Image: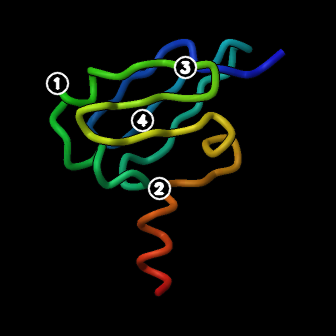
Amino acid sequence: MTTSPKRVWTDPNNLWVELNDGRTLGVPLAWFPRLLAATSEQRAHYELSPRGVHWDELDEDISVDGLLAGQGDQRWHRLEAA
């Protein structure tokens, strides 16, 4: 069985993802600068896929595998490392 997102929500500091296997993951919004800078209305407009979450308006894609591995936005990490 593939672990996939079932529900997504945010609070002022965190992104929460409920998975189809019963787990709920919480990670800091700071891991995803575009989500952090977005309004709550923008963050509420997402699409679920079997592998992750997509925010079209924000051009943000977050995979369940990445969350489970403890990875934030890899583009920002690469820029910081350069």
Determine the CA span between mark 1 and mark 4. 14 Å
| Residue 13 locus on image (x, y percent) | 32, 43
Q: Residues within 10 Å of mark 4 (few under 14, many from 20)?
A: many
Residue 49 circle label = 3
Tell me which label, 1 or 3, sits earlier in the chain. Answer: 1
Q: Quadrant of residue 56?
A: top left
Tell me which label, 2 or 4, sits earlier in the chain. Answer: 4
Q: Is residue 80 above or below residue 42?
A: below
Type of amino acid under label 1: Glu
| Residue 32 locus on image (x, y percent) | 39, 51
Determine the CA span between mark 1 and mark 2. 21 Å
Residue identifier under label 1: 41
Q: Nearer the viewer, mark 4 or mark 3?
A: 3
Q: Nearer the viewer, mark 1 or mark 4?
A: 1
Question: Is disc 3 placed on a helix, strand or loop?
Answer: loop
Determine the CA span between mark 1 and mark 3. 20 Å
| Residue 58 locus on image (x, y percent) | 26, 40
Q: Nearer the viewer, mark 2 or mark 3?
A: 3
Q: Nearer the viewer, mark 2 or mark 4?
A: 2
Residue 15 circle label = 4
Residue identifier under label 2: 73
Type of amino acid under label 2: Asp
Q: Quadrant of residue 55?
A: top left
Q: Is residue 42 above or below residue 61?
A: above
Question: Is disc 2 placed on a helix, strand or loop?
Answer: loop
Tell me which label, 1 or 4, sits earlier in the chain. Answer: 4
